[in-house]
Amino acid sequence: AQKITQTQPGMFVQEKEAVTLDCTYDTSDQSYGLFWYKQPSSGEMIFLIYQGSYDEQNATEGRYSLNFQKARKSANLVISASQLGDSAMYFCAMRDPNTGNQFYFGTGTSLTVIP
Amino acid sequence: GAVVSQHPSWVICKSGTSVKIECRSLDFQATTMFWYRQFPKQSLMLMATSNEGSKATYEQGVEKDKFLINHASLTLSTLTVTSAHPEDSSFYICSAPRTILYEQYFGPGTRLTVT
């Protein structure tokens, strides 16, 4: 069963606008971690933000924030004030402590920032 | 700066030959490292979990005799693609968890092309 679902294969956003990238997850565990990574065309995976399942506050890191809705099992990434350099693939991932902390990745969302 | 390195960054080899890819944690020790494979415009697929001092754990469908993994030290894991075929051409990425959050730091990836 798919554990991480990203339903937006591609998104466009105007420069300086905010954009939300969707992510839903499936787990029966109480303890888990949710992550967002950015992958530019160079291929490297860049860690953006983390949300723990017990964290009551939504995580924020600079222009990135995570809209965590535990009951709905969603962990959407919000990028504020988009920049041209934000154009990349974005992957949502979940750490599963039951499988040696391996990560399950979504299929990714390709974000294009339009000048 | 990068905390996980990979070498080589790209390699072209002939069908039937073997290729070794190195993954190093630069300023921390990693008892566990993960190897992923990524096809163009697709997500990362976990191939195996590399464990220092013990055998690697392979995901279902991954041939352990074809993709040899050796976790030689607390900072080095190697993936050897044996008897490579054109269908093995892909982007191979390693990662290592670093902190209590278990966020994974990824290497820059190795692009393998088998001719």
Image: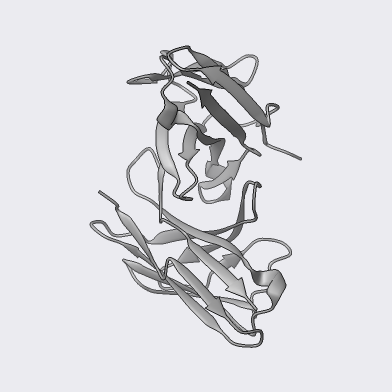
Which residue is at 66% across, 71% downward?
A: B88
Which residue is at 41% across, 56% downward?
A: B108
Q: Position of residue A81 (x, y in %)?
A: 41, 14
A31 versus B47 height, above or below: above
Q: Is residue B59 found left or right of A18 in the rendered image?
A: right
Q: From this viewpoint, which residue is outermost toward the front?
A: A115
Which residue is at 44% across, 49% downward?
A: A44
Q: From this viewpoint, which residue is outermost toward the right?
A: A1
Pick the front one: B97 or B94: B94
B83 versus B31 height, above or below: below
**Can residue A50 be seen from the camera position used here?**
no
Pick the front one: B64 or B105: B105
Q: Is residue B52 found left or right of A101 in the rendered image?
A: left
Which residue is at 68% across, 36% downward?
A: A3
**Can residue A94 be seen from the camera position used here?**
yes
Q: Is residue A9 found left or right of A34 in the rendered image?
A: right
In this figure, which colouring scheme has been used for the structure? Answer: one colour
B16 versus A109 height, above or below: below
Q: Position of residue B66 (x, y in %)?
A: 64, 78
Q: Position of residue A15 (x, y in %)?
A: 46, 17
Q: How many marks?
A: 0
Quadrant in which the N terminus of chain A is drawn:
top right
Q: Position of residue A12 (x, y in %)?
A: 59, 22
Q: Quadrant of residue B89?
A: bottom right
B107 versus A23 height, above or below: below
Pick the front one: B45 or B53: B45
Pick the front one: A99 or B6: B6
